[in-house]
Image (spheres, grey):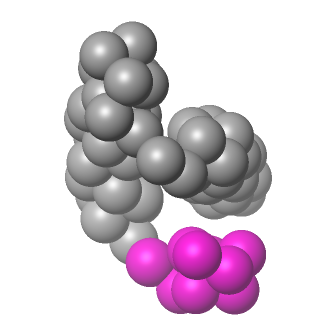
Amino acid sequence: MKPNEIRNMSSEEIIEQVRQKKRELMDLRFQASIGQLAQNHRISETKRTIARLLTILGEKNARTE
């Protein structure tokens, strides 16, 4: 997900995306622990996406205050 796409979302949509990505990260970690995850890079990509979402959400909240 690109930063411009995230910036066009509302705060509520960003929060929902964060929830979905955190669930996805939990599933990926579980798969990795039992040896089913073939694409280990997806864990770090998901972490980066969560960080990107939270950073842009913080920017939006700082603008509204």
User: Which quarter of the rendering shows the C terminus?
Assistant: top right
Q: Residue at x 58, y 86 (%)?
A: 5
Q: Which residues are magenta?
A: 1-9
Q: Position of residue 49 (x, y in %)?
A: 61, 53
Q: Nearer the viewer, residue 50 or 55?
A: 50
- Residue at horizontal 31%, vertical 16%? 34
Asked whether the viewer can see residue 7, the reply is yes
Q: Position of residue 58 (x, y in %)?
A: 67, 43
In the image, residue 32 sits, relative to residue 59, either above or below, namely above
Spot occupied by residue 57 in the image (x, y as percentages of width and height) = 58, 51
- Quadrant of image for the N terminus: bottom right
Relative side of 61 to 22, left or right:
right
Q: Note whether 39 is above or below 9 in the view shown.
A: above
Residue 60 position (above or below residue 6): above
Which residue is at the front of the view, 12 or 43? 43
In the image, residue 29 lies in the stretch drawn in magenta? no
Please say if 59 is above or below 29. Answer: below
5 in magenta:
yes
- Residue drawn at (68%, 40%), measured in percent from left and top? 44
**Residue 59, x across and y down, in percent:** 73, 53
Residue in view at x 34 percent, y 56 percent: 17
Return the residue found at the far top: 33
* Left or right of residue 9, residue 23 in this image: left
In the visual, does 44 lie left or right of 26? right
